[in-house]
Amino acid sequence: MYVNKKNRDFRNQPPVEEQFQAYGEYSYTYQHDEKLKEETNAAQPQPHIAKPAEKKAKPRRGGSIFFRVFALLTLLTVGLVVVLQTVFRLEAVCVIGHKTHTAQQVINASGLTYGQSIFSIRQEDVARQLEKDHTLIFKGLQVKHPNLVYLQVEERVPVALMQWLGVHYVLDKDGLVMEETTGTELIGTLPLVTGIRVSGAHKGHFLTVKSQTQLDAYCGLIVELNKQNYAHQITEIRLNNPENIYLVTAEGISVRIGKAEDLKRKVQAIRTTMSYLRGLGEDAGVLDVCDPTDVKYRSDN
């Protein structure tokens, strides 16, 4: 038996005999080294060993989860609707600033209704509704959840009287016409405004004037007179010349105001000086308060 040099170290190992059957009747014995057998076996294809089939994963129950989520959302939606319909409904309105009007009159004028959704209340809607009532001024709205509203208003107050084309018009501090009358019952109860160049006057609307300077002077002066509680001592406001305004007091004394500026100090000067003149029995003359720090009086007696 021929031995390769590479296998020389294995000469002392006993040969392994294998018998092969050829054509069914002949056989022969073949001896080889153990290492050669191993190399031969390694070269032969290995038989395929079937692995046990893996278990198929069960499909997820996606449809069931979807319907559970859908049912939950439906319940939440229904619950939210029920809460909105029963809890967040207007139950009380607190009216601030009313004097001659009742609270219910203001609420009716505002368009607010009990039971309406608290989320449907908008400030601009309420302001627009109150504009239809010329005796009220909208000042603010505050919603307190779940069912309360604070409504603040200011009532327009008659503060002056104006005559135009034979008709007397009752004005508020902003020049809005509150009433129209052909009678004389109001004369003497409110200061009479003269000299304003009017081009239109209608109840519930502001005066239409040819000189905005005259109207601004009226508004500033009448506001300050009422603020210092002195308007009832004035019988006439002469606005022929807004640069040189005159007042007439209940005692009959003419008061020169000048321009409609520094009105707070000018009205204070009138009050102080008239108190002194009243004590002297003065009932005719001219009081000049154009400079409230240097008051002048000229008697006609």
Image: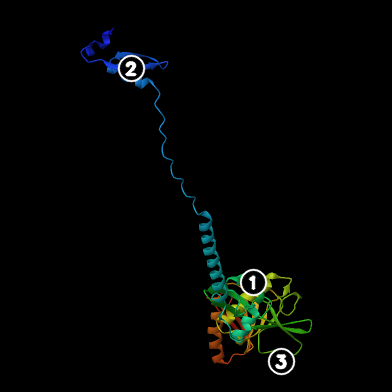
What is the total number of numbered labels drawn onto the structure image? 3
Amino acid marked by disc 1? Asp
Q: Name the residue under label 2.
A: 19
Q: State the residue position of label 3.
A: 185
Task: Mark 2 vs mark 3: give the one in front.
Answer: 2
Residue 265, percent from left and from top: 54, 76
Depicted 210 relative to depicted 22: above or below: below
Q: Do the residues labelled 3 and 1 touch (CB within 8 Å)?
A: no
Along the polypeptide, which appears first: circle 2 or circle 3?
A: 2
Callout 3 amino acid:
Glu
Judged by depth in the image, the label closer to the viewer, 3 or 1, is 1
Q: Which residue lies furthest to the right in this view?
A: 165
Furthest residue in direction front, as rendered = 25
SS at circle 2: strand
Looking at the image, residue 47 sits to the left or right of residue 268; the answer is left
Q: Which residue is drawn at 40% across and 32% down?
A: 49
Asked which quadrant contains residue 168, the reply is bottom right
Dot 1 corresponds to which residue?
125
User: Mark 2, mark 1: which one is toward the viewer?
Assistant: 2
- Residue, x 54% and y 64% (percent of image)? 71
Residue 184 in the image: state x and y as whole percent.
73, 90
